[in-house]
Amino acid sequence: MMVPATAVAGAIVFGMANGAIAASFAVSGQTFKVGASKLEGTGFKQYGGFVKEKDGTAHPVAVSEIADAKLYDLCQSVKIPDMPIVLTINAGGGGRPATATGLLIDMDELGGDAEFKGIQIGRDATELSPEATAKSFGQSADSVEITDLQQVARSTSAAVFTLNGLKLKINMGAKAKECF
């Protein structure tokens, strides 16, 4: 009896490590901004979903999965509520992009100029993810390129996220500006 349980647990851990299975966690309820001069990705999937806060409050989101991604001139910012304080993270500059494998993003907004190759629009979302709602809308593409990326997200996870040239800073007062 222990062997099948161990095999299933091992498969789940392997799937999470390779980005095939999303790690489930309670979101903070606060959004954050992500900007990049360019995102290049392969293995793109997108469908609707929900994320939950620890108290059970649910938020509808657009879920984007990207098997392999490169982000150039990455900026991430989060504003501390009711205070003139913004935490920023910058990486991926100087021709050394930030990279991610098994990238999973739960977002409220996405903007930029996008080009998709090999796109399929209107797929049943459960063909893209077993966690998706049956008969709900989904789309996928072999690759995606988004220039002037501006995204408002609730959570991001990845099997591996490499931040080349990482700079984290707490900005206060008049310097407390978000990425966009």
Image (cartoon, helix red, strand yellow):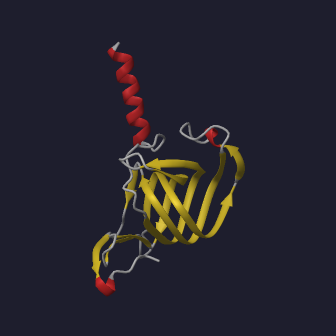
Residue drawn at point x = 71 percent, y = 50 percent: 120
Relative depth, front residue between 117 and 30: 30
Residue drawn at point x = 32 percent, y = 85 percent: 175
Is residue 22 rendered to the left or right of residue 127?
A: left
Relative depth, front residue between 49 and 147: 49
The answer to which quarter of the image holds residue 42 is bottom right
Residue drawn at point x = 72 percent, y = 48 percent: 122
Is residue 163 rendered to the left or right of residue 104?
A: left
Q: Is residue 122 above or below residue 110?
A: above
Q: Position of residue 90 (x, y in %)?
A: 37, 72
Is residue 127 rendered to the left or right of residue 171?
A: right
Relative depth, front residue between 145 and 61: 61
Q: Position of residue 79 (x, y in %)?
A: 36, 71
Q: Is residue 47 above or below residue 21?
A: below
Residue drawn at point x = 40 percent, y = 36 percent: 14
Q: Position of residue 24 (x, y in %)?
A: 41, 43
Relative depth, front residue between 97 and 28: 28
Q: Position of residue 44 (x, y in %)?
A: 59, 52
The answer to which quarter of the image holds residue 114 is bottom right
